[in-house]
Image (cartoon, helix red, strand yellow):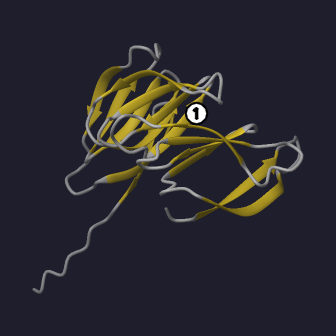
């Protein structure tokens, strides 16, 4: 197992400008640390085949982080995680979308999963989860987390291979790889 170093920056928000109150690199025994989602209480790390790890973020002195729990799906690899309310929505590689109940972060439990292909990125906005699956974006209705429903597929232009997504209302922002080739003309 390799040591992975990640940096956690915590901002203090007020009516004035945000202020950095914690900025510290932290080393831990993670396999890969593909994706990270933090709120004021917990840090959720999508850690490849090791699954989803949940760390407690203490208010007074958050370091070292305390590992509360680790959810490992029977197969696949946790790629990215997005947390909304009491649910963690995980792009779980070959398993597609995995939805976990995290109302008790010490014991996350499987709510449902939806095999929609090899999911490697996720963003949640309202009642929809937007997952990057291979060369397309799959849109899943998650209004009932126990019964997610695939409601749409968007395929960008050929060779556009999206790598990241952010959604706000009806606008999609995609991160993509631009492939270059030497044509020797």
Which residue is at 75% across, 37% downward? 41
Q: 135 or 108, which is in the foreground?
A: 108
Q: Is residue 178 left or right of residue 99?
A: left
Tell me the residue at 81%/43% (across/down). 58
Q: Is residue 19 left or right of residue 57?
A: right
Where residue 48 sits in the image (x, y, percent)? 43, 49
Q: How far across and down, in percent of the image, does residue 178 sit?
A: 31, 65
Going 58% across and 33% down the picture, which residue do you hit? 83
- The part of the image, by quadrant, that contains residue 101 is top right
SS for callout 1: strand
Q: Residues within 10 Å of mark 1 (few under 14, many from 20)?
A: many
Q: Quadrant of the C terminus?
A: bottom left
Q: Is residue 145 left or right of residue 20?
A: left
Q: Nearer the viewer, residue 81 or 131?
A: 81
Residue designated by label 1:
83
Numbered disc total? 1
Q: Position of residue 126 (x, y in %)?
A: 53, 24
Single out the residue that lies furthest toward the front: 1
Identity of the residue drawn at 29% across and 27% down: 152
Is residue 79 placed above or below 182 in the rendered structure?
A: above
Q: Indicate the position of residue 84 as horizontal and vertical percent values.
A: 59, 28
34 or 108: which is nearer to us? 108
State which quadrant residue 86 falls in. top right
């Amino acid at each position: 197992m390799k040591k992975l170093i990640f940096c956690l920056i915590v901002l203090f928000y007020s009516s004035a400008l945000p202020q950095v109150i914690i900025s510290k690199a932290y080393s831990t025994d993670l396999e890969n640390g593909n994706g990270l989602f933090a709120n004021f209480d917990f840090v959720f790390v999508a850690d490849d085949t090791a699954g989803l790890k949940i760390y407690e973020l203490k208010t007074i002195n958050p370091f070292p982080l305390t590992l509360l729990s680790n959810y490992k799906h029977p197969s696949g690899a946790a790629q990215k995680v997005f947390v909304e309310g009491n649910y963690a929505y995980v792009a779980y590689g070959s398993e597609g979308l995995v939805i976990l109940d995290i109302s008790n972060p010490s014991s996350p439990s499987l709510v449902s999963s939806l095999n929609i292909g090899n999911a490697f990125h996720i963003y949640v906005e309202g009642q929809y989860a937007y997952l990057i699956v291979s060369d397309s974006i799959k849109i899943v209705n998650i209004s009932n987390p126990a019964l997610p429903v695939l409601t749409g597929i968007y395929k960008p232009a050929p060779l556009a291979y999206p790598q990241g997504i952010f959604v706000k209302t009806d606008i999609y922002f995609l991160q993509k790889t631009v492939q270059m080739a030497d044509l020797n003309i």
